[in-house]
Structures are given as C-alpha cells and as structure tokens.
Amino acid sequence: MNTPLDSIDQIPLPQGASGTAYAAELLAAPDALTGLSPKEALTVVGYMTPRFFAANTTFIREGDASDNGFMALLIEGEVVVERVTVSQGEPVTIRVLGPGSLIGEIGLVDSEPRSASCTANTDVWCAILTRASINTMIERDPVVAARLLLGVSANIAERLRDTNRQLKLYARLATAMREELSNVSTPVAPRQTP
C-alpha cells in the first residue's frame, strides 16, 4: 500500500479539485451514512492518508487477519467486493462500489479477519483511515471520533439489515421449493371410475 503522496490534496482529481475538500464532501454525503457534518468530515480527512491501487489489485483479502487495521474511503474508481461461499469455490460478487463508499470498516472496528475481498476494478484512489489514526482522533478530537464511529456502526447495521432481508427472502424461497418438491414427489393415486 505504498504511495508517493503525502496528502489527500495531492490526489489527481479532474479540474484541479482539492482532494481534501472532495474527500470530506464524499464522507459527509447522505449516501455515506456517516452522519458527519462537513466540518467534522474535514477533521476526519485530516487523519487519512492517500493510497493508489492499480486496476486488478486485490487490496483486502477475505480471511486476512494480519492486514485488518484500516478502512478506506473510495475517492476515485470502482471496487468489486467478492466473497467465497460455502457451496462454491469461486468468489461471488457481492457489490460494486464507487466514489464515496466506505471499504473495510468491519475489520477496522472488530479486528477480526476480513469478511470479503476487495479488488480495484479500475485504477483507484482511496483515503485510508487506520486504527492508529482513529485512536489518535479519539484523544485529540473525541466528539468527531465518536460521531464517525457511530456513523460507521450505522453503515454496518444497514448492511446487516439488508443481509437479514435477503435471508428472509431465501428462506421463503426454500420453503416454497420444498413444498413444490413434496407435491411432485408424492404419487397421485389413479382415478377410479364407478
């Protein structure tokens, strides 16, 4: 994850936009679900560092427990999130993320192995927030850190609710399929004529 840039402002954006201002705008947007004000988002971006990932680079690996101490705000590009399912050996695409998306926040919060793999579908610029940076923010800007962590928690909760909705749908489908199969496999007695 090495990059020659020292500041978010050095990220090459179209029309010479400020990387810091743009990252803060993305972080404070309603879609980000962080609940941060523009001023709070600027504070958070001050704790972030820029990172570039070339297309086809997997920068988060499912199951990795050694590199789980960061989350990323996607500033430019597209990232594919994949997970290997129990029934298949090949990864399944869960979603495709664009600018403004938070990536890797679950591992950042719980220090557990990564739950999915993230691969740059295009060249990608991210703003990285490490666990160490969050700890520093908690000491220096505790209110902003608390609001960020509440926002990240809300983001995770929304994804969990979405997963629960999908599981309910799958359970209904499985029940309907079982009922249909039991109707098909039960032999029908021939009609008797009087």
Image (cartoon, rainbow, N blue to C red):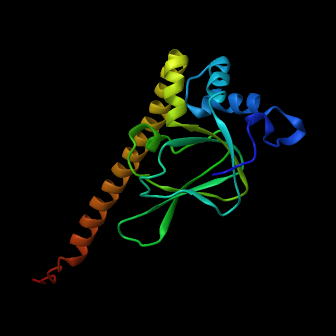
| 164 sits to left or right of 59 | left
Q: Quick one: 156 or 171, which is closer to the camera?
A: 156
Q: Quadrant of residue 126?
A: top right
Tag count: 0
Task: Examine the rendered structure and indicate whether residue 55 appears above or below residue 34.
Answer: below
Choose between 65 and 188: the one closer to the eye: 65
At horizontal 62% and vertical 19% (from top left) the residue drawn is 40
Q: Residue furthest right?
A: 15
Q: Name the residue: 50% across, 19% down.
A: 139
Residue 148, visible in the rendered structure? no
Residue 144 pos. (x, y %): 55, 19
Residue situated in front as seen by the camera: 59 or 26 = 59
User: Measured along the vertical axis of the image, is residue 46 above or below residue 68?
Assistant: above
Within the image, what quadrant is residue 72 found in?
top right
Measuring from the top left, give residue 56's x and y in whole percent: 66, 64
Instruction: Kindly tell me whether residue 160 is visible in this rendering.
Output: yes
Whether residue 123 is situated above or below residue 74 in the rendered picture: below
Q: Quadrant of the C terminus?
A: bottom left
Q: Position of residue 106 (x, y in %)?
A: 45, 42
Q: Residue at x 46, y 40 (%)?
A: 108
Residue lying furthest left: 194
Residue 42 percent location from the top left of the image? 68, 23
Q: Is residue 74 left or right of residue 139?
A: right
